[in-house]
Image (tube, rainbow, N blue to C red):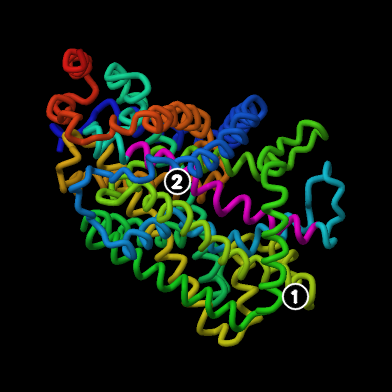
Amino acid sequence: MARSIRHLVFWPTFLILITAVSLSVRDKDSFLANTTAMNNWVLDHFSWLFTLGSVYLLVLAVIIYFSRLGNIRIGGEDAKPMLSKPRWFSITLCTTLAVGVLFWTTAEPLYHLMSPPESLGLEAGSTDAILFSMSTMFLHWSFTPYAIYAVPALVFALAFYNRRQKFSISSMLEPVFGPRITRYSGLIDALALYSLVAGMASTLGTGALTLAGGIGQYTGGETTPLLLGIIISVIVVTFVLSAASGLQKGIARLSSLNAGLLLVLGVFVFVCGPTIFMLKLGVESFGVYLDTFFTRSLFTGAAGNDQWPYWWSIFYWAIWFAWAPVTALFLGRISRGYTVREFLRVNLFYPALFAVAWITIFSSASLYFQLHTDVDLNSVLNDQGVEHVLYSLFDQLPLSGVWIPLLLFIAFVSYVTAADSNTDAIGNLCTRGLTADSEGNSGVPMKVIWGGMVGVVAWVMTSSVGIDGVKMLSNLGGLPALIIILLASGAIWRWLSNPELLNVEANPRRDACAATSHDSKDSAAILDQKAQ
């Protein structure tokens, strides 16, 4: 493994995370104060760029879909798909949703209902606040986040398969800056890798707290470091084994299982919950979402000195951007053999529609029980935490004794499904020699190392510092990731005017020289000579 490792990608990220964890344990208050201050600085100075960037990518995706570029086949006209469309969609859906949407679609609407932005003059719990709450859920969880993932994933897919670039985030920048950008590939990949590993740790910590809360429904015990350690260990072992078994086995099978469980869960709540209210409120609020899309998407709170966008929309955009570069590597790699138009349907349009349906069911149900019954889910949220809202909602539905244990299992599978795909991408990013013609990937040891690192960071943070600390670490990667993605989108504009640049036969293989020394100046010089 030592000979195949990309040292300039692996070691900086590994050592920075170890250092951050050590500092957080040594001085918790100072660590949180410093990371919070850095995050506030990023949001204060670049909130406008996050909002513009998110809208820009969605608009760009629409332009691509209806352009000539939509007919281009990823990998060339003779490329064969590595996945069937149903399996491809289930992997895409489940590796991007993760466990967060399962719990936040019931908890987040309550925040917006009871604490809407002050600058908008909405009264808490009012009709306008209800519509604001639901339309905000569509904004945060449907088309915009999937566009942030889909566009860079498409750029990478075309660069990797059609332009024969190496497995690196810098490959997305090569069409804009030329082969010389490869000399910085180690730095670029390490930066994105750091953001993703920290993000996975925060999500794993949140997932562990959620599962511990569900277990507490039966045991009545408190969430202890020992319990969190056991849960995190089981999750890490499962997703590492899944990732190690490969794309066609572990990842694909878990994704299919997860998609099926989510479908069953959604149908059950739709049928047994306030069905008519869900449909009516979902349709009405989706209309509000469409009507106010640009106004709300570009809302920074500057005019009214309102901090709400920092806490919610812009905070979300930073998270999505931080995860997007490495997620793009995985989503792009599994898309060979399909056209660009098919890619956008499977990676943006269909998952976003699924999210719209999910929000219509679960967010509407949460608001219904809060507004029209004696169940005070908002008190549950404030007193017990986000993870208990969904369990409390299911207590009001038939067969809750059966469904709550199943919820625990679905939450477990949801996180594992997302984590194994990211572990696969992380391992590949740290490995030399992966090419568009190679079916292989990184070895098991690399995935074990990063899986263990994610688990250790998640356990230490949740047990001693709290999940906010590692979230801050992840979010700090949002700004450089945003810049990388916006620069990479320049490749799309080149290809829109010159689709022939994506002709596989016209792009000689560059993998052989790039694979020998991904991060050295020698490899950059070789590429420069070939370009000349």
Q: Secondary structure at mark 1?
A: loop
Give the percent coordinates (x, y) of residue 297. 66, 42
Q: From what the image shows, is residue 269 above or below residue 115?
A: below
Quadrant in which residue 519 is drawn: top left
Q: From what the image shows, is residue 73 above or below residue 263?
A: above
- Image disc number at residue 65: 2
User: Is residue 452 in view?
Assistant: no
Q: Is residue 142 magenta?
A: yes
Q: Is residue 408 magenta?
A: no
Judge by depth and name the residue closer to the eye, 285 or 505. 505
Magenta stretch in the rendered image: 129-156
Disc 2 packing (10 Å; few <14; some 14–19; many ≥20): some
Question: Could you tell me the amino acid type at mark 2?
Answer: Tyr
Q: Quadrant of the C terminus?
A: top left
Position of 234 compared to 242: left or right?
A: right
Instruction: Tell me the residue that label 1 is attached to.
Output: 375
Give the percent coordinates (x, y) of residue 10. 29, 32
Quadrant in which residue 45 is drawn: top right
Position of 1 compared to 280: left or right?
A: left
Residue depicted at x 72% and y 42%? 295
Position of 201 compared to 293: left or right?
A: left
Q: Secondary structure at mark 2?
A: helix
Give the percent coordinates (x, y) of residue 515. 16, 29
Judge by depth and name the residue closer to the eye, 407 or 491. 491
Question: Could you tell me the amino acid type at mark 1?
Answer: Val
Q: From what the image shows, is residue 18 above or below residue 276?
A: above
Residue farthest to the front? 68
